[in-house]
Amino acid sequence: MTDDVDNDHRLYVLLPDSWTAHAKQNSTKEYCYRKSEGEEHFHLLMKGEIYLMHQGEKYCLNCALQQEAVTRNRMHWQHS
């Protein structure tokens, strides 16, 4: 096992009391609450996709990263 940070795919929720993580269980059409930068449409959440939920709103991990709800920085708690 290496300590290479580039291979660390873990994400950390900055406010864990406000967000919950889910894996989409079905194929019903559900969309991310936030549009990706430069896009005109909301994107579809896919069966098996991991997403975050906040106050009833669903966010794909890419959008959660963009709005800084999650971080890749495992030492984030030291900088709060």
Image (spheres, grey):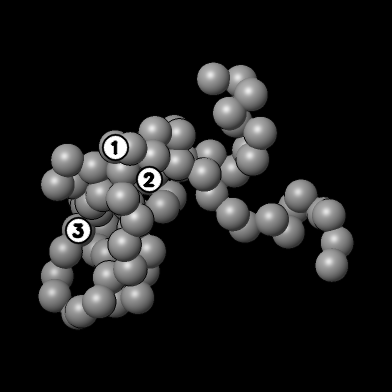
Q: Quadrant of the N terminus?
A: bottom right
Find residue 14 and report its image quarter: top left
Please state which of the two labelled residues, at mark 1 or mark 3, is closer to the viewer: 1
* Cα–Cα gap, marks 1 and 2: 16 Å
Residue 31: image tag: 3
Above-or-below relation of 64 to 51: above
Disc 1 + disc 3, Cβ < 8 Å: no
Q: Residue furthest front?
A: 17
Find residue 73 and report its image quarter: top right
Of labels 3 and 2, earlier in sequence is 3
* Cα–Cα gap, marks 3 and 2: 12 Å
Disc 2 marks which residue? 63
Q: Is residue 53 left or right of residue 5?
A: left
Find residue 23 and report its image quarter: bottom left
At x 86%, y 61%, the residue is 2
Any part of residue 33 in sight: no
Q: Position of residue 30 (x, y in %)?
A: 16, 64
SS category of the residue bearing label 1:
loop
Of labels 1 and 2, earlier in sequence is 1
Disc 1 marks which residue? 18
Q: Position of residue 56 (x, y in %)?
A: 14, 47
Amino acid on which the number 1 mark rests in the picture: Ser
Q: Camera-side residue: 28 or 17?
A: 17
